Amino acid sequence: MHIIIFFIVLVSVIDTYWLIYNQTIISHVELNPVGQFLILAGGGNIELFVLCKIIGTAACAVVLYNIFKINKRKGFIIAGMVALFQLCLLFFLYFGHLYIDI
């Protein structure tokens, strides 16, 4: 279980790295409507977006760990689905430019 949560957090860290790395163009290329809103709410800056990503990732890790402590089977299923989503995000981060005209 710890490896699954580690993977989820690792992908989130990579995503945040690319967000910070591309901060000069992120307001034009961010596809997530929540991310777009947070950038707009932050006056075009990414600080609010990054803060929300960090808080959201930490909350996700804590919730997943607690679900696992209560019910191992459900914890693995839920964490596995989140990890699968994160794997898709990781592929999108590195190969999405092949499919989207930026």
Image (cartoon, rainbow, N blue to C red):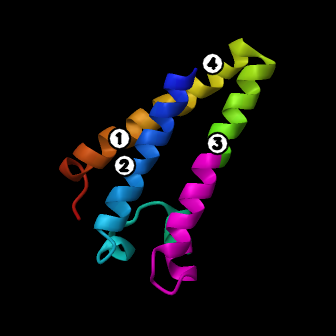
Residue type marked 2: Ile
Label 4 – label 3 distance at C-alpha: 14 Å
In the image, which disc is placed on residue 90? 1
The quadrant of the picture occupied by the C terminus is bottom left
Quarter of image, res 48: bottom right
Residue type for callout 3: Cys
SS type, badge 1: helix
Q: Earlier in the sequence, mark 1 or mark 2?
A: 2
**Is residue 46 rendered magenta in the image?**
yes
Overall secondary structure of the magenta stretch? helix
**Which residue does the image show at 71% across and 14% down from the upper left?**
72
Query: x, y (%) of residue 51?
Result: 56, 65
Q: Secondary structure at mark 3?
A: helix
> Separation of disc 4 and disc 1 at Cα?
20 Å
Q: Are the residues at dot 1 and dot 2 in contact (C-beta closer than 8 Å)?
A: yes
Mark 1 belongs to which amino acid? Leu
- Position above or below: 89 against 51: above
> Spatial distance from mark 1 to mark 3, Cα to Cα?
17 Å
- Residue 1, given in percent of the width and then of the height, sits at 58, 20
* Range of residues picked out in magenta: 38-58
Q: Earlier in the sequence, mark 2 or mark 3?
A: 2
Q: Identify which residue is drawn at 64% across, 42% down.
A: 60
Earlier-in-chain disc, 4 versus 1: 4
Which of the numbered marks, if any, corresponds to residue 76? 4
**Residue 35 percent across, percent down from the top left:** 51, 65
Q: Is residue 87 visible?
A: yes
